[in-house]
Amino acid sequence: MGFTLIEVLVVIAVIGILASIVLINVSGSRGKARIAKAQMESRRIYNAIFLLENDTEEWPGHQSINVLCTDPPEDCDNNELCDDGCFHKLSDGFGGLTQDDLDDPYPSWDGPYISEIPLDPWGHEYFFDTDYTMNAGTPEEKQAVVVGSYGPNEEGLNLYDEDDIFYIIISE
């Protein structure tokens, strides 16, 4: 008993449709897994910031703890630590998490507080910002201190937008 050409083509078409559905679901799951990883790593970096804060009474970049820089005073200059367009990175000595600042040592530094600052799932470094604008341009707009990732943007780095993934340390 043999199969006709039409039966074989129908079976191939059905298998192709099922394979497409599976690939779409796998792709969506992969994106969700990357977001979950970025959330977990942001929380891990926050824990390192908390340890730095407990030892030195400073945040990364020698910033005052619990200060939300809405109208930056002098102690909020260069308040962002990121990998593109910022004066310093979270991963360098100025950040204080992986090593002490050789130019201006942190008081009572007892780190490292995290072995390394990982790259986010999209290959970029995480940021720390003490004047991050959440919900920009909406009635719910407010400022916060956050650590996070720029998310899956295709356009590049340092884009503060709706796909950012961050952990809120304090907010208005």
Image (cartoon, helix red, strand yellow):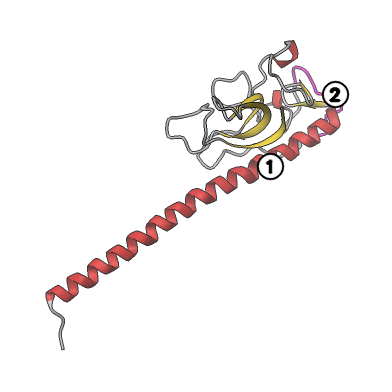
Which residue appears at 13% of the width and 78% of the height?
4
What is the distance, in whole Å, between disc 2 and disc 1 at their CAs?
24 Å
Mark 2, Cα crowd under 10 Å, few <14 / some 14-19 / many 20+, is few
Which residue appears at 83% of the width and 29% of the height?
109
Report which residue position mark 2 lands on.
107
Residue 58 highlighted magenta (yes or no): no
In the foreground, 137 or 99 = 137
The correct choice, above or below, for 3 with respect to 70 in the image is: below
The correct choice, above or below, for 92 with respect to 114 in the image is: above
> Mark 2: which secondary structure?
loop
Indicate the amino acid at tag 2.
Pro
Which residue appears at 56% of the width and 39% of the height?
120
Can the viewer see residue 32 in this picture? yes
In the rendered image, residue 142, in percent from the top left (x then y), is placed at 64, 26
Residue range highlighted in magenta: 102-111
> Within the image, what quadrant is residue 107 found in?
top right
User: Which comes sooner in the sequence, label 2 or label 1?
Assistant: 1
Tell me if label 2 and label 1 are in contact, CB under 8 Å.
Answer: no
> Within the image, what quadrant is residue 138 found in?
top right
Residue 110 highlighted magenta (yes or no): yes
Q: Identify the residue at the far bottom of this view.
A: 1
In the rendered image, residue 16, in percent from the top left (x then y), is placed at 28, 64
Question: Nearer the observer, disc 2 or disc 1?
Answer: 1
Which residue appears at 33% of the width and 63% of the height?
19
Mark 1, Cα crowd under 10 Å, few <14 / some 14-19 / many 20+, is some
Indicate the amino acid at tag 1.
Arg
Can the viewer see residue 98 in this picture? no
Image-based side of 71 in relation to 5, left or right:
right
Report which residue position mark 1 lands on.
43
> Within the image, what quadrant is residue 165 found in?
top right
